[in-house]
């Protein structure tokens, strides 16, 4: 068993006194695909069935008789600028002084923001303890001077680790002298896992055709057009030569339908106050009725529902308060929680002012309420932007689009509430609904029709408009188009408002799920 230098003063140091910078080299020119690293990792770290910290993906490249199988050892890339650390709201994912990205399960709330942020699909939820987990370089072995388990068991020395400051180490020499590659360099995470001799069809998850399903190992595979791969058919979607993914593991999306529902209810919660306050300031909403009672009640009700959905989506819902007791301030989950809390306080004060008949206080609250309502509607765009793995969400127009969606949702709710209360604001709210629905449709169509800068964004857009999410997407767009009729007839106002809300819900679901539909590893 190979040992690393061990220092006993409590701080890991190199021979020249500097803090170590641990790196790993995966030599795919040597890898034989034996999966010893996978089994050793499972044994060493007690990783349960159905999930893996490390696995070996294999891709068949070429056509018979000129074909070969290529391997790629896949695991956490130990990024210098780790997006999972930035996105984690409780510092459950953290970066050690020696560069190793480690995790603290006792701090994990199971929000899955780290999974959405990782461009390498290296993080998973442990099905036994429901906490986020990944390869951590076998940090417990490093700390006592031992190499990671995968390095020890590899029979062909295809996995090497070293301190980058140690210029005599074999891994360091390979990095400095040999051509090596990293996965997805365009994400600018500065990985510390380097690949030597890896075929592009293994490094790029979109370069090889993926068979139906996620978990497979096969002898003969048929492309979608029915032709045999060994008959010389080359998939035009591949980046270069014919390539077929032969072995992979399951890849589950982190955020399910509840996240789309949360963005929908949050739009209503923010939009109802946003539109009511604006209409009140402009003189279209009287100082009574909807403004006094419906605005704080509806806003707080949907805000509470939003919070309940967020907590429901956590793997550890009982730990949700960690967002406030141990916040990691770069995370937009934490920032969003503070924004929602402040906005909720405004709604509570508005309701209190209504009980006390304090018109002046209600009016004064608009100064804080309007920006907080707007921030509540748009902060999710910054949360999605921290999901660096998902190119569809890296959209600078997403914040204004979310603001338009909130305005549309708020106008729809006020239209319904105004009709029930027989309030004269109904006509104005229906007109605003029509304009905001039109703006929403134009922004949606612009987003899907304008050229996208990456293959990942183009594939996600394809799934959105022509794939398995096309029905809720186009259904949502069609309902929004129908909502434009709201001001043209009094009887159409409420049906148009209901269609606008239903269409927004369908669109949000499709958008969130399509963004996660592209394979990352």
Image: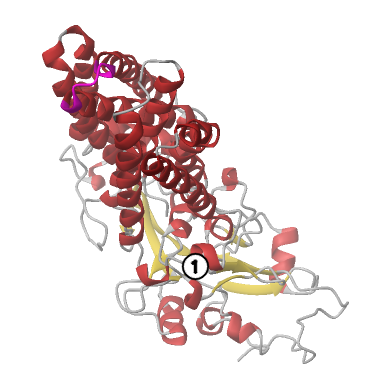
x, y percent for residue 83: 56, 54
The range drawn in magenta is 420-426
Residue, x 43% and y 41% (percent of image)? 353
Q: In front here: 277 or 203?
A: 277
Residue 66 visible in the displayed image: yes
In which quadrant is the N terminus drawn? bottom right
Rendering quarter of residue 260: top left
- Residue 203, horizontal then vertical, whole percent: 48, 52
Instruction: Tell me which residue sits at (22%, 55%) in the image.
Output: 213
Residue 125: where, in percent of width, then height? 38, 68
Q: Position of residue 482 (x, y in %)?
A: 19, 17
Task: Name above or below for residue 476 compared with residue 198.
Answer: above
- Here the colouring is secondary structure
Which residue appears farthest toward the right when viewing the image? Answer: 16
Label 1, residues with CA under 10 Å away: few <14, some 14-19, many ≥20: some
The quadrant in which the C terminus is found is: bottom left
Q: Secondary structure at mark 1?
A: helix
Instruction: Specify whether 315 is left or right of 223.
Output: right
Q: Is residue 391 left or right of residue 472?
A: right
Q: Measured along the vertical axis of the image, is residue 313 above or below residue 391?
A: below
Q: Residue 449 lies in what quarter of the image? A: top left
Asked whether the viewer can see residue 233, the reply is no
Please give the residue where the numbered disc 1 appears in the rendered image.
322
């Amino acid at each position: 068993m190979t040992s690393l230098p061990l220092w006993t003063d409590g701080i890991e140091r190199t021979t020249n006194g500097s803090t170590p910078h641990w790196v790993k080299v995966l030599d795919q020119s040597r890898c034989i695909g034996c999966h010893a690293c996978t089994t050793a990792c499972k044994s060493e770290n007690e990783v349960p069935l159905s999930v893996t910290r490390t696995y070996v993906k294999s891709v068949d490249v070429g056509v018979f008789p000129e074909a070969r199988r290529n391997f790629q050892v896949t695991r956490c890339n130990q990024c210098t600028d780790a997006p999972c650390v930035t996105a984690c709201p409780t510092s459950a994912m953290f970066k050690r002084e020696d560069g190793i990205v480690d995790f603290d399960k006792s701090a994990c709330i199971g929000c899955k923001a780290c999974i959405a942020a990782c461009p390498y699909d290296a993080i998973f939820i442990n099905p036994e303890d429901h906490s986020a987990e990944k390869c951590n370089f076998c940090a417990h072995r490093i700390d006592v001077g031992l190499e990671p388990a995968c390095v020890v068991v590899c029979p062909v020395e295809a996995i090497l680790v070293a301190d980058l400051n140690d210029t005599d180490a074999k891994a360091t020499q390979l990095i400095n002298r040999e051509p090596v590659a990293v996965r997805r360099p365009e994400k600018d995470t500065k990985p510390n896992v380097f690949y030597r001799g890896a075929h592009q069809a293994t490094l790029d998850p979109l370069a090889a055709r993926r068979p139906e399903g996620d978990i497979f190992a096969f002898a003969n595979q048929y492309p979608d057009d029915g032709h045999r791969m060994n008959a010389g058919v080359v998939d035009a979607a591949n980046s270069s030569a014919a390539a077929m993914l032969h072995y992979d593991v399951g890849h589950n999306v982190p955020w399910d339908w509840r996240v789309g529902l949360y963005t929908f209810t949050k739009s209503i919660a923010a939009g109802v106050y946003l539109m009511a306050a604006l209409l009140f300031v402009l003189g279209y909403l009287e100082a009574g009725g909807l403004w006094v009672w419906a605005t704080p009640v509806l806003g707080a009700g949907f805000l509470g529902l939003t919070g309940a959905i967020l907590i429901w989506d956590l793997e550890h819902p009982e730990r949700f308060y960690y967002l406030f007791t141990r916040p990691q301030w770069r995370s937009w989950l934490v920032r969003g929680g503070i924004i929602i809390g402040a906005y909720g306080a405004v709604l509570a004060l508005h309701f209190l002012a209504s009980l006390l008949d304090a018109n002046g206080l209600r009016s004064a609250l608009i100064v804080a309420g309007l920006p907080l309502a707007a921030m509540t509607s748009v902060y999710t765009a910054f949360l999605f932007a921290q999901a660096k793995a998902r190119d569809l969400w890296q959209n600078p127009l997403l914040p204004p689009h979310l603001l338009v969606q909130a305005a549309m949702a708020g106008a729809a709710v006020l239209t319904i509430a105004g009709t029930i209360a027989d309030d004269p604001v109904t006509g104005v709210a229906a007109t605003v609904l029509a304009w905001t629905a039109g703006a929403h449709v134009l922004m949606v169509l612009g987003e899907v029709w304008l050229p996208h800068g990456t293959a990942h964004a183009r594939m996600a857009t394809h799934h959105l408009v022509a794939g398995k999410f096309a029905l809720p997407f186009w259904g949502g767009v069609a309902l929004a188009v129908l909502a434009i009729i709201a001001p043209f007839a009094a009887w159409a106002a409420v049906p148009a408002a209901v269609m606008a809300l239903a269409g927004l819900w369908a669109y949000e679901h499709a958008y969130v799920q399509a963004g996660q539909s592209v394979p990352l590893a």
